[in-house]
Image (cartoon, rainbow, N blue to C red):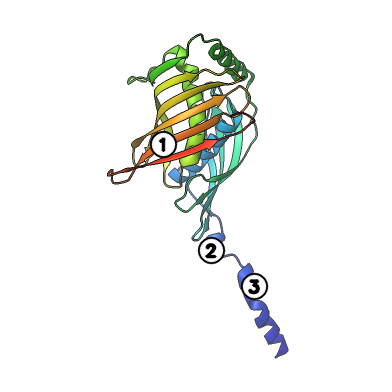
Amino acid sequence: MMKILCLLALLPFTIQAAPSRSQIPSEIPTNSRLARHAAKLALEYLIYQSGSPHQLLEVTDVKRATLLEFPFVGHKYYVEFSAQVFETMENIGLCSASVFFLDKKPRPSISLNCSSTKVQKQARDDDYEFYKMMKAQTSPLTGENIPDSYGNIEPQFEPVWKLAILGSSYVILDKSTEEHEYTMAQIRSVRQIPRKDNFIAFSFDIFLYQRPSEEMVPCNLHVVWAPGRPPKVDHSCQDYTENGSGSKAEEGSASLGNFK
């Protein structure tokens, strides 16, 4: 009788320790939207942290993907994928990441490890050449509709476009949810902001393309950057409601480094 009572006393602890079905990772198709969404967000994190507008990356293949459900809290995705430098198509090797979405909340928590995160020498050189060119401007650079309606970008605006993509990576990380994806679509207008310190700065009006709504979301970005470090990004976006009857403004900022 005493033995039975001891076993009954331990039963609640046994139940608590046993994993529920929802706490066991389940495999999901590597070609599914959710698997690629998690991998792309992890890569956006790496792009932002690299601080290099001339080393933009893309996912080439998702090798493995699992989903761990936390009821009433959110979903955590584990993905293994390969990636490459967009411009040179040089493979950066394999990456593994966890991407944790809280229910219906933006700004997923991301942990990432890649076999190579080093910025290539050519990218570093191109970053510095662009930086020097902007510092030498006698009048602030301005432009609009980059790329144009035919997808063309004038050569002088190529690095500006890449810097906007680098800055938008933070906005994409800040706004993305499990259901909503964002991609940089176009610079509507850009204006260089003169600075007397060691940084260059731009004000961008951009469009982000949102899935699945297929809306173009207008955002304003203030990007402050110098080679070798992530940019400081202040942003304000105007998101349309699902029924198209209204809108809401969202603001955010990323401040890394010792500058303002």
Residue type (three-letter) at the residue carrying disc 3: Thr
Q: Position of residue 167 (x, y in %)?
A: 51, 29
Query: Residue sitting at 72 percent across and 86 percent down?
Result: 3
Q: Position of residue 243 (x, y in %)?
A: 28, 46
Question: What kind of element bears circle 1?
Answer: strand
| Image quadrant where one finds the N terminus | bottom right
Label 2, on which residue?
A: 21
Label 3, on which residue?
A: 14
Residue 72 visible in the displayed image: yes
Tell me if residue 225 comes above or below residue 245 in the rendering: above
Q: CA distance from mark 1 to mark 2?
A: 39 Å
- Nearer the observer, 158 or 37: 158
- Nearer the observer, 85 or 246: 246
Query: Dot 2 surroundings within 10 Å: few (below 14), some, or many (20 or more)?
Result: few
Label 1, on which residue?
A: 237
Q: Position of residue 129 (x, y in %)?
A: 58, 13
Q: CA distance from mark 2 to mark 3?
A: 15 Å
> Does residue 98 appear left or right of residue 140 in this picture?
right
Q: CA distance from mark 1 to mark 3?
A: 49 Å
Question: What kind of element bears circle 3?
Answer: helix
Residue type (three-letter) at the residue carrying disc 2: Arg
Which is more foreground, mark 1 or mark 3? 1
Question: What kind of element bears circle 2?
Answer: helix
- Nearer the observer, 22 or 217: 217
Tell me if residue 164 comes above or below residue 33 in the rendering: above
Which numbered disc flags the more N-terminal residue, 2 or 3?
A: 3
- Nearer the observer, 235 or 106: 235
Residue 36 visible in the displayed image: no
> Does residue 87 appear left or right of residue 120 in this picture?
left
Q: Position of residue 215 (x, y in %)?
A: 33, 37
Which numbered disc flags the more N-terminal residue, 1 or 3?
A: 3
